[in-house]
Each structure stands twice: as C-alpha cells, then as structure tokens.
Amino acid sequence: MYILTAKNVTKSFLVQGDKKNQILNNISFSVEYGKITSLVGASGVGKSTLLYLLGALDTASSGEITLNLTNSSTKEKIFYDYNKMTPNELAYFRNKHIGFVFQFHHLLPEFNVLENIMLPALISGASNSIAKTKALELIEQVNITHIIKQYPNEISGGEAQRAAIARALINSPSIVMADEPTGNLDSENTKNIMQLISKLNISAGITFLIATHSKEVASMSHYIIKMKDGKIISDAAPTIQTEFN
C-alpha cells in the first residue's frame, strides 16, 4: 500500500524575466506505507526541493501529489490531493499528518527541550496537560529524559536531533519527512539517530521519507530512490554494493 504518490511533478523558479530554472523534471514515484524510503543523490539534485513539495511546504509548478490514508474507524480510503486544498487547509493538513526533521534541528532557542516538543501539539489545539503527557512519552522513547529542562544551546547536536524527532512525532503524523537528518552530526551520532529511526519504524510502523547524500543512511532504508539533475534515475532496495556517486 502506498501512502504518498507523486505524479509528473515539476518545479521551476523564475530567474530573469521569463527565464526559468527547472529544479525538478517530471518526477513520479510512490512511498510505501510503514517503510523507510531514502531520496539520495549529490547536493543540488533537488532532494530538498522535492521533500518540501511532498511535505506541502511549497507548491509544485505542475503535477500531482496525494497522501493516501485509511480512516481508522470506517476503514474508508481518504485521498488528500494537494492541488485541491487551500493554503489554510494545507497548513492544518501539515500539522496533523506530516512530521518534519531538518538537518539543523530548528529548535526554538527561547523554549526548553520539553516546551519545544510540546509546541506542535499546542498549535493543533491540545491542552497543556495532554501535550506535556505526549511529549514526556516521546522524550522517554528517544532517550533524552536527562535534558528536558535544558535549552537548545545547552545540549549536543545528537540530543537536539533526538528532540527534533520527538517534536516531529508528537501529533502522531502519518509520515515523517527528514531532510539530511544526520548531515550535521559526527559518525557516532549519525549511527545513533539512524538506529532510533529504525527502531521507531519497527516498533510503531512509522513511515519515513529521508533526503540524504549519505550511503550509510540510505543503506538502512527499505527503498532507495536515486536522483540526478532533478530526475529520478533508479528506484530499488539497497544492497551492500550500492553506490550513490
């Protein structure tokens, strides 16, 4: 079952007058529910741009993107077509269904770790007590109970990224999108973060879509989508011999 589908997606930017810089060219692929999928390729191939479109943070120049869900009560299929939603509807949709993790954690400096993790739940309308209870559960899951009262400038990069993952999960999203989640970490913290993502995927069935240039990160995925020059050039399960040059 596919949770996310992109069909003939393109993205261009105007650079001078009518001249266009095409970043993505006719992208089509699907993300399988409950799996870890990696978008791989060198810097500048369009991975981050594509992730932002799939996460409804930006709009495509053309093409279709749909998130495909099942109502837990009625088992009815629900298809969210990005092209048919207003900006306000997309904002609500993002907060409810999509979790984001970025290379730079983007924790707000004026809030401590616990408050940062609670924030998306509070924005979605949860009470302070419910948001705090959810946050504390996630904090235990990602093993950062020792830093909940500390501020972003007082913790390590690995701890900050664990906090960012907990924040991404607090609204129980349908899919988590991660843009170079280990790109700012050393090898040990990279290994720890990927082990955490794998653990969350296995234990909770969370779907992850990860943009990365790292062979090590991609090798832990169920599927690898390789990009070059704004296009998808291959789609396969990883092997030990996989190269991403």
Image (spheres, grey):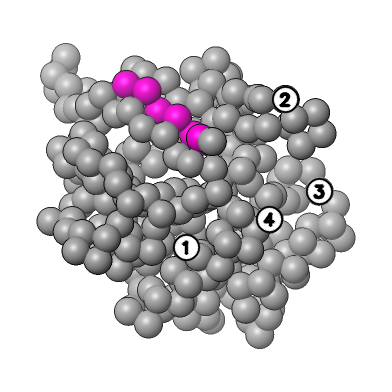
Read off the magenta span.
Answer: 2-8
SS of the residue at dot 3? loop
Image: 14 above or below 91: above
Three-letter code, disc 1: His
Please name the residue shown 75% across and 68% down the image: 137
The tag earlier along the polypeptide, 2 or 4, is 2
> Residue 72, how many percent across, how many down?
76, 37
* Residue 76 circle label: 2
Please name the residue shown 50% across and 26% down the image: 66
Three-letter code, disc 3: Ala
Q: Main secondary structure of the magenta part?
A: strand
Image: 28 above or below 31: above
The front one of 73 and 211 is 73
How would you rate the neighbour count of disc 3 (Cα within 10 Å): few for under 14, some for 14-19, many for 20 or more? some
The tag earlier along the polypeptide, 1 or 3, is 1
Count the labels in the image. Answer: 4
As measured in the structure, the alpha-carbon distance from the residue carrying label 2 to the one carrying label 4 is 24 Å
Q: Which residue is mark 4?
A: 170
Image: 176 above or below 233: below
SS of the residue at dot 2? loop
> Residue 42, how many percent across, how many down?
18, 52
Three-letter code, disc 2: Glu
* Residue 17 circle label: none
As measured in the structure, the alpha-carbon distance from the residue carrying label 1 to the one carrying label 2 is 36 Å
- Seen from this angle, which residue lies furthest bottom? 146
